[in-house]
Each structure stands twice: as C-alpha cells, then as structure tokens.
Amino acid sequence: MSEVYAARRERLRERCAAGGSATALVTRPANVRYLGGAAPRGAVLLLGTSEDLLLCGAPPSGEAGEGRPDEALRVVVLPRAGGDPAVAAADAALAQGADSLAVEEHHLTVARHRAIGSVAPRLRLADLGCAVEQLRVIKDEEEISCLRIGAEIADQALGELLESILVGRTERHLALELERRLVDHGADGPAFATSVGTGPNSGRRTHRPTDRRVEEGDFLSVCLGATYRGYRCEIGRTFVIGTSPADWQIELYDLVFAAQRAGREALAPGAAYRDVDRAARQVLDSAGHAEGLPPLTGHGVGLEIDEDPQLAPAAMGKLDACVPVTVEPGVHLPGRGGVRIDDTLVVRPEADGGPELLTITTKELLAL
C-alpha cells in the first residue's frame, strides 16, 4: 500500500503546484487516511518540500484492527499534551523552506486558521479546497474490495436478523442487535447509526430508532451499513411483518422498487448525476409523490458514508467508472409508513457487465 499512498500524495502535490502552493496541510480525517493510512485521532498530514510528515498528539497504537500509517511517512508526535498538530505542521513547513501552504479551509476552524497564520506569518496561506475529496471519488480495486467485504458483512447481519422473531421487539433493540452482528462478522463497526422504522415510522430517511414495538401488519424498514478497513457501505430494505401485505403496501412497494431499479439502470460512465436522480425521481413523481421526496436519490460512499458525487436534481458532473454510489429512493406516507430500498453499487461500463451490485439481500417484498 505504501506505493499507493505515495502515488495519491504525488497527484495532490501536482495539483498544489498548479495552484502555486509549495506545500499542503491536510486536516480532514478521511483525507489524512486516504493519503497516509490509518492515523491516530486528530493527526494531520503535511505534504512538504523535502519530506511528508504525519503529525499527531499521540503515537499510533499499533493495534491490529486499527491499522498503521504509511511506513514511508515520518511520524512526528508532539512533545507536549494539548499542542495542535496543524500549527506544528505549519512550523515544519516553514522549517523546510516553504513560502506557501495550502490548507483545507472547509475543515479548519477560524481559530485554527488564525493560529497557523500566527505561528508562521511568513507563509502565504492558500485554500486547498476539496482537492483530496475529488481524488477520492474514483476508487481503486483495493478500495472497492473493502467496500465489497463490508457489503457482505451487512448482508449477513441483515439476513440473520430476518430469521429471528421480530414481533414485540422495539426499533431500538433491533438496531442495537444489527450493529452487534456487524462487529461479530468482522466489521470495524457500523458505517453510521443504524435506522430501524416500524409502522408509521417506516420509510423515513435517517429515522432514529424509538421504543415503538413491532406489530403484526407493520412495514419494517431497515437501513444499515458496515465499515471495513475504514470503508463504508450502505443497504436499506423494507419488509412486512407477520402477515400477507395489504394492497396499499404492495402498490407502494412496487412503486419504490420500480424507482430504485430505474436509478440503478441509469448508472453508467458518462451519465450525468442529475440524470440518475431524474430516472428514479420521475417514477415517484408520476405517481403523485413529488411532495416530500428526499433531496437526493443517492450519493457516493468510501471512507465516509456520504461522499461525492451527489445524485440530486441540481448536481453538476458526470459519473466515472469505479465510482461507488448508493441508489436509495423512498416514499413515506404520514401516519401510515413507507418504503425505502437502498443499494450500494459500483459504476462499471456495459462491456464489464454494467453496475456492480455490492448489497445482494433480496428486494422481494417478504412477509416475515
């Protein structure tokens, strides 16, 4: 992996040079990990003129599950507690003879930005912008492999839950059990707070589990994800509890399924982000559900659960191959409940079989 990290840093270095900056300071945790491997909390990465440094307030733990920084980086542990690695990195850039430093202004606080300027007043501070996030959009096969394993873990955890007795259990209890199963099957942990919604709570995007108990005839919607080696995937499914679905439940489920299928089929290299969103959204719009739809129907995933690209009506840009995204339309009917269907896929050209589906739990409407 050391060569991979070095190549990523070199691509960033080229962008910095094109913008007139000799050095760069990376502070956003996911970006630090992308460029330098696993690092202690609060660590920052300096792309220097003579060497690249990982600066942190405590040494890496060395625990197997946590991972290690890139061995090609020199790790600098601050000598006193409470010191700011970002400020120390600016001082190190100055010591290397740099006259400019690109920083992630979208991540730095105002106070931190001022502290950097104070300790190194001769450094010209520039905005790095979202240069690292842009590099992260297209994944290499090692990254996709981590997402694929995470998806397998999430599928396993969900499949086991569906084999258990659900009636009478609370949303909160089911969410906690799913998260425990993720870890049992090898995940670093959940990719985000697991959402379980029953009855009138079902189908709500980012619903926080409550103490409502599962009842016969409920819709049960579940959205969970696994983190594996730092990479996060997502899956969402909706089921009916304990009985044959009612006519309105079948109709609503079939509608959302059709929207999700349309979104998945629109995924291809060169497809506009907004066109993928439109493919899924127009199915729901045409059925009279334009009001209350979520602002997007999908997004990128990777070291964070919500990355670029955003599949939304006003999103600018086009998909590339090897970009993992979710497709997750849903409809919620106030007081009755709703349906969400959510998959993680990797954009692939038609010659390679089209979009690769990572989350494979059935999308058939099951009565549990």
Image (cartoon, helix red, strand yellow):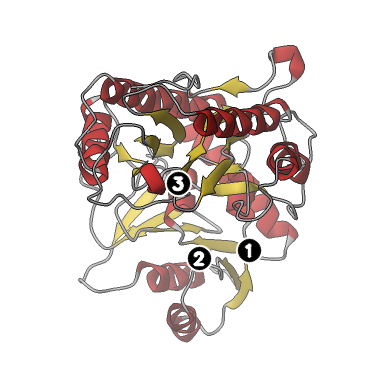
The picture places residue 125, in percent across and down from the top left corner, at 60, 76
Residue 244 vs residue 143: left or right? left
Q: Where is residue 104 shown, x and y percent of the image?
A: 55, 66
What residue is disc 1 on?
A: 129
In what element is the residue under mark 1? loop
Q: How much space separates mark 1 and mark 2, taking CA atoms?
A: 23 Å
Q: Earlier in the sequence, mark 3 or mark 2?
A: 2
Residue type, label 1: Gly
Which residue is located at x 36 percent, y 36 percent?
A: 218
Foreground residue, 99 or 209? 209
Q: Quadrant of residue 229?
A: top left
> Going 60% across and 34% down the picture, which residue do you hit?
256
- Quickly name the residue at label 2: 96
Q: Which residue is mark 3?
A: 336
Regarding mark 3 in the picture, which secondary structure is present there? loop
The residue mark sitting in front, 1 or 2, is 1
Residue 250 is labelled as none
Q: Residues within 10 Å of mark 1 (few under 14, many from 20)?
A: some
Whether residue 263 sits left or right of residue 221 in the image: it is: right
Cβ–Cβ below 8 Å for labels 1 and 2? no
User: At x 47% / y 22%, what residue is drawn?
Assistant: 365
Give the answer, above or below, for where 98 lies relative to 169. Answer: below
The correct choice, above or below, for 289 with respect to 86 in the image is above
Circle 3 residues within 10 Å: few <14, some 14–19, many ≥20: some
Give the alpha-carbon distance from disc 3 to disc 2, as whole Å.
Answer: 63 Å
User: What is the spatial separation of the Cα atoms under label 1 and label 3, in whole angstroms?
Assistant: 44 Å
The amino acid at mark 3 is Arg
Left or right of 298 in this view: 195: left
- Examine the image and state in which quarter residue 167 appears: top left
Above/below status of 93 relative to 224:
below
